[in-house]
Amino acid sequence: MTAHDTAAYETAVARYFEAWNAESADVVAKAVAAAWAEDGTYTDPLADVSGHAALAAVIAGAHEQFPGFKFRQTGAVDGNHHIVRFSWELVSVADGSAPVAGFDVIALADDGRIRTVHGFLDRVPTD
């Protein structure tokens, strides 16, 4: 990976959102395997997990907590070397409201899949 491999960064982030927005357990499992290295991790204020099964479970939990919502990228992807950052929000398909927003910093493995995610929540529901 070069010092500024924009295509690799954008591909990794696109796969990340494919995993988070997958709608069935089988599709989530396949998308997680495509996006994350086998020993990939995800850490945010609400979760700290490792491995594909645990990652898929976190994604399923988000879908249970926010049915009818999709994650979408906001702003540009930025990166250097193997580190990438981007912002996102969780948007209601029904009315376009976005009660949750944040940004993530990911580290990529040599094959372009995600090794680690460190997520930060900038906006969360108050109730």
Image: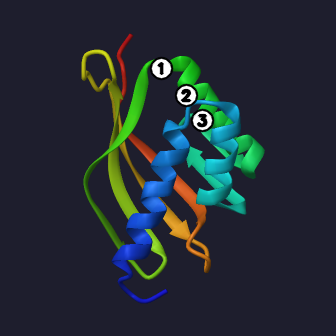
Figure check: 48 above or below 85? above
Q: Residue at x 38, y 81 (%)?
A: 5
112 displayed left or right of 75: right
- Location of residue 56 (image quadrant): top right
- Circle 2: is it few (<14), some (14-19), or many (20+) Cα within 10 Å? some
Task: Name which quarter of the figure residue 94 lies in.
Answer: top left
**Label 3 neighbour load within 10 Å: few <14, some 14-19, many 20+:** many
How many marks the image carries: the answer is: 3
What's the residue type where badge 2 is placed? Ala
The location of residue 51, given as percent across then percent down, is: 75, 52
Residue occupied by mark 1 = 66
In the rendered structure, the answer to whether residue 87 lies left or right of residue 30 reads: left
Q: Residue at x 73, y 42 (%)?
A: 54
Mark 2 vs mark 3, CA separation in Å: 5 Å
Which type of secondary structure does the marked residue at label 3 adopt? helix
Q: Residue 62 — which label?
A: 2
Q: Label 1 crowding class (10 Å Cα cut-off): few <14, some 14-19, many 20+? A: some
Question: Given contact means CB atoms under 8 Å apart, are the residues at marks 2 and 1 in contact?
Answer: yes
The alpha-carbon separation of the residues under discs 1 and 3 comes to 11 Å
The residue sitting at 60% across, 35% down in the picture is 59
Q: Secondary structure at mark 2?
A: helix
Residue 59: assigned label? 3
Q: CA distance from mark 2 to mark 1?
A: 6 Å
The answer to whether residue 30 is above or below residue 10 is above
Q: Are the residues at dot 2 and dot 3 in contact (C-beta closer than 8 Å)?
A: yes
Amino acid on which the number 3 mark rests in the picture: Ile
Question: How is the model colour-coded?
Answer: rainbow
Q: Position of residue 62 (x, y in %)?
A: 55, 28
